[in-house]
Amino acid sequence: MAWLDALRGIAAVVVVFEHGFKFLLPEARLPVKAVFEPGWYGVLVFFLVSGYIVPASLERRGSVRAFWITRFFRLYPLFGVCVAGVALLTAAGWDGLHIWWGSRTISMTVGHLMMLQNLLYAPNLVNVLWTLSYEMAFYLLVTAMFSLGVHRRSTAGALGFAVVAVLGAGTLPVTLLSAGGSGRMLTVVLVVATLVAVGLAAVLAGSGVVRQAGAVVIGVTVLGLLAVNQSYPGPGQGVLILATMFAGTALYRAEQGEISWKQAGWVALVPLAGIWLARGEFGLQTAIAAAWITFIVGMALRHRKMPQVLAWLGLVSYSIYLLHPLLLESVERFWPEPLAVPLGLRLLALAGVVVLLFGLSALTWRFVEAPAQRLGRRLISGDG
């Protein structure tokens, strides 16, 4: 599905320029964000793409075990590269870790290993990692729904999350469980880790009632975190992200003929809910609208040949997304006050960062991502 790769490529590059404003073009950052939030545009396109294709991957194979093998080898090897990059920057004195890595080491480590740190009040090791928490929440919910046999209710899921987002935006608590000290945070992290592990074990190894019980444990745990324990971007926007992903799934089902386009059309209420929640933030409103328009246009052109450069950018988009903050923070080491540097030099530096980023992403794709994904596929085929 080259059109999905093209969308990923566009989204990744837009996110890079969002953070490039902060480190190299701060004078343009606020004026641009006032009319268009490039970061939110990028991540919403990513979420729509994930919603469209991830449940399809699970249902196509019909195996939860195969699904999690592919997810593990898709996400974690490059995540390890990102962590190693942070470690190198820290050792070189170019970057510093959040103070909680010294005082709440177990909580921070376990939270990140589960990729649920953003729902556990654990500051992200790298700023962009917050989106992986919502991706992981989605994977867990999709797994639970598939195990319970309700996975095809995507439109209902999208609308349900959208309603909760709108009604709960000003009432849902923030970090209700985890805030209140290191001991409390550690307890919540370990309880969540245990519940998720036990739930997944039951789903993967059990059958009948055991499998269903595991699915319920997973679902209740994730929904509880989403309802009362989010921090950034807040309960309303966080729940809306899940609505967005389930909306992407509903569009996939309509495209496959599993549901009618009329039924899938109800998910148009999801971006409207997002725009309503973002009232007073014109830049965010335009980003939400643009992300949905981009995705719909991509769907309309899905049978056409995509530009090769966009398809390639999509192929390495995960590397681009995870690695670009490390390069930009390295620039900050040399130019802590970018406004004191001539604009021409900063633009040249931004171009250099992008070229270097593309080169690194090509290497990590070839030597990390692609081999890891091949290994995952071999494990699945060997199991079959």
Image: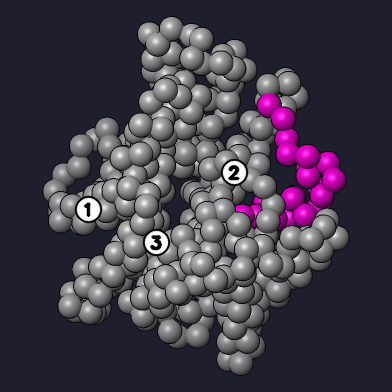
The residue sitting at 20% across, 37% down in the picture is 307
Residue 166, relative to residue 299: is it above or below?
below
Q: Which mark is nearer the camera, 2 or 3? A: 3
**In 3D space, how far apart are the residues under numbered discs 2 and 1 (Cα atoms)?**
30 Å
Q: Mark 1 points at which residue?
A: 293
Q: Nearer the viewer, residue 331 or 336?
A: 336
Region of the chain picked out in magenta, as a range: 95-118
Residue 95 location in percent, x, y?
A: 68, 26
Magenta: main secondary structure equals helix
Q: Which amino acid does label 3 sit on?
A: Leu
| Residue holding disc 3 | 277
Q: Is-magenta flag for residue 279?
A: no
- Could you say which quadrant of the image residue 89 lies in? top right
Amino acid at the residue labelled 2: Phe
- Which residue is disc 2 drawn over? 79
Q: Which residue is drawn at 27% across and 37% down?
A: 310
Alpha carbon separation for disc pair 2 and 3: 32 Å
Lower position in the chain sequence, tag 1 or tag 3: 3
Question: SS of the residue at dot 2?
Answer: helix
Q: In this view, does 50 lie to the left or right of 262?
A: right
The percent coordinates of residue 19 (x first, y second) are 47, 32
What's the residue type where badge 1 is placed?
A: Ile
> Is residue 366 visible to us here?
no
* Mark 2 surroundings: few (<14), some (14-19) or many (≥20) residues within 10 A: some
Q: Residues within 10 Å of mark 1 (few under 14, many from 20)?
A: few
Residue 139 screen position, x and y as percent? 51, 65
